[in-house]
Image (spheres, rainbow, N blue to C red):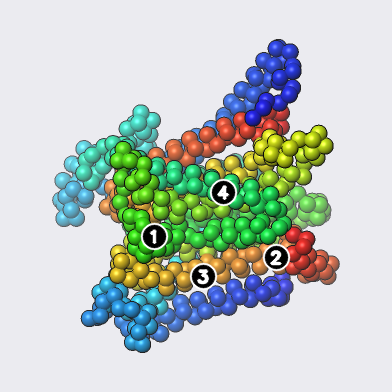
Amino acid sequence: MIRTLLRLTSARVALVLLAIIAVVAVLGPVLAPYDPLKGGAQTLAGPSAKHWLGTDYIGRDVLSRILAGAPLSIVSTLEVAGIALALGTIPGILSVYLGSVFEWLSLRVVDTFIALPFLVFAVAMTALLGNGITQAMIVVGMLLAPVFYRVSRAATMSVARSQYVEAAAIAGASTTWIVRSHVWSKVLPSIAVTLANTLGIGLVVISSLTFLGIGIQPPTPTWGGILASDLGYLAQKPYAPVFPTLLILAAVLACNLLADAIRDAAGETGRALTGAKTARSNRTRRLAASADPSRS
Amino acid sequence: MSAPPSALTAPPAARRGVVAHRIGRAVASTARLLAIFVPVFLLGTFLTYLLGHLSGRSPAYLQLGDAASPQAVAAIEHKWGLDRPFLVQYGDWLGSVLHGDLGTSWYNGLSVAHALGQRAAITLSAAGVALVLGIVFGFLLGALAAHFHTRWPDRAITTFTTVISVLPPFIVGIGLAAVFAVGLQILPAAGYVPIQAGLGPWLSHLILPAIALSFDTAADVARQLRNGLVSAYRGNYVTGAIVRGLGPRRIFFVHVLRNGIAPALAVLGLKFPNLLGGAVIIEAIFGLSGYGVYASQAAVRGDVPAVQGVLVVSVVLVVVFNLLVNIVLNRVTPDADRGV
């Protein structure tokens, strides 16, 4: 599947964008030309040779702040997605196998999380738990977990009813073995698609929270926090929000492109992962069909 | 909308049967929805209450500061009934919530229900205008895309909806404020004017936040409606209607729209929590002091009853809105009449 994925232009674009963002996140604080917390005499200056992206309302270098804020924004997004993945996928697969009581209970919990207004709840829970970045990540991860639950449950149910799984069960295979060798490979592509989407959503949610000053308070630089301080000085510097916005949008776009590319590469059945020759030829045919716009 | 021919031509007794059947259907589907939402409401409130309890926040620290003596803290906690067992507190709180009493704020001792009532107009106008914009533009774009299915307007609309659906509301909000309020200076950047002051000023303060909120809803409604209409046009009854010589407008409104609208309406019910949630951040951008700002301020202060009040009200709003969507779905779609 990975080789098919790399053949898609959209996947390549997405991976290049994500690689750039990863480099920025890892090397950002080192590359920052100035101290992101130290103000200067020049306030709200426009872009110049000295300050590439200008300075903010107390003279801090904007480029340095964006670079220094990258690790917090990116790493917390990754952790949010990881928490959501673990909290959603495992109960999702287990709900098919662990009997009706667990199934009913977990479905009600998931319904509840989906019906709740997401941001209101995230803001309230984070602040009540002590308003720190760890709390924010746990809360957002928990609130995003239902998507993984539903996706993995749906994929597991479609496998669990298939004939080859029945055959394996009749042949005496244990549930653990079936989950590991049949269910897992089928669930994986859907999970990968959801994970890529969740990374995009997670970044937006984390930026929204930091924009509100929840999770991380100023002056610690984050992309959301930079946007919030730019908002107060729109009249003097109306183009200031463009830089953090472009970074956030590029990251979200890359995640969405990657999700679509994985969906295309894996196919709806998820067979591509098995690497069978027929599956590969089916996939090529499908890709050719989707590349032909007259048939869409 | 005309009633199905069977109800018009059938003898009175059979017709009464049809009516009773329809009422039964509506009651049954409402009951099914309640069966989902009553546990959701209980679980949601229980979680919020548990969270407030686990947070270890107490009105004592809000009123006395961190240096309070243990006796003073215990006295205040006793006054608020916080020294009782957790489940007793929750039951007590739930009972008063059902009577419409959301308790009093730890921060200023004012009634939470009263504070929320004052702010309801702001949040509900912003979310309401956003909802109207989302429905109008979603339906227009979706119907246009379905009408020009596979031709260039369809592709243009599909691309457009894909792009706007990935734009986060707070980025759209900042962009709109920068362009229309600060750059062109044709609309106010912040604040709220009650509707009593005139429709024009009211709408001019709300239109930017509402547009920022509506993008996501409009995009999803348009996509669902397009797919619903395209598959409804493939139905045999549409071919039948064309053969019977009905005009395209009649076919669209009576046959296709009523059958193809269901997914779009359903997604509207799902999008409503997002509208309320998005309001938190949009209100902060546009300086509207609605539920969202109240919730985030209360949350940062550790004012647990106020936060719980906002959560309860938003869960109730979501439930009510979904019930309304369900009723409309039952009225509009012909499948519901047939009891499918």
How crowded is the residue under tag 4: few (<14 C-alpha within 10 Å), some, or many (20+)? many
Q: Mark 1 points at which residue?
A: B180
Q: The residue under label 4 is which amino acid type?
A: Gly
Alpha-carbon span between mark 1 and mark 3:
26 Å
Residue displayed at 70% across by 12% down = B12
Alpha-carbon span between mark 2 and mark 1:
40 Å
Alpha-carbon span between mark 3 and mark 2:
20 Å
Mark identifier at residue B138? 4
> Is residue B100 left or right of B242 when viewed as pictured?
left
Residue displayed at 52% across by 53% down = B216
Same-chain check, marks 4 and 2:
no
Q: Earlier in the sequence, mark 3 or mark 2?
A: 3
Where disc 4 sits, the SS reads helix
Q: Name the residue under label 3.
A: A251
Q: Mark 2 points at which residue?
A: A264
> Is residue A96 left or right of A237 when viewed as pictured?
right
Where disc 3 sits, the SS reads helix
Where disc 2 sits, the SS reads helix
Alpha-carbon span between mark 3 and mark 4:
27 Å
Mark 1 or 4: the one toward you: 1
Image coordinates for residue B157, horizontal then vertical, percent: 61, 57
How crowded is the residue under tag 2: few (<14 C-alpha within 10 Å), some, or many (20+)? many
Q: The residue under label 2 is which amino acid type?
A: Asp
Front-most of residues B288 and A141: B288
Alpha-carbon span between mark 1 and mark 4:
23 Å
Q: How many marks?
A: 4
Where disc 1 sits, the SS reads helix
- Tell me the chain of label 4: B
How crowded is the residue under tag 1: few (<14 C-alpha within 10 Å), some, or many (20+)? some
Mark 2 or 1: the one toward you: 1
Mark 1 or 3: the one toward you: 1
Front-most of residues A76 and A240: A240
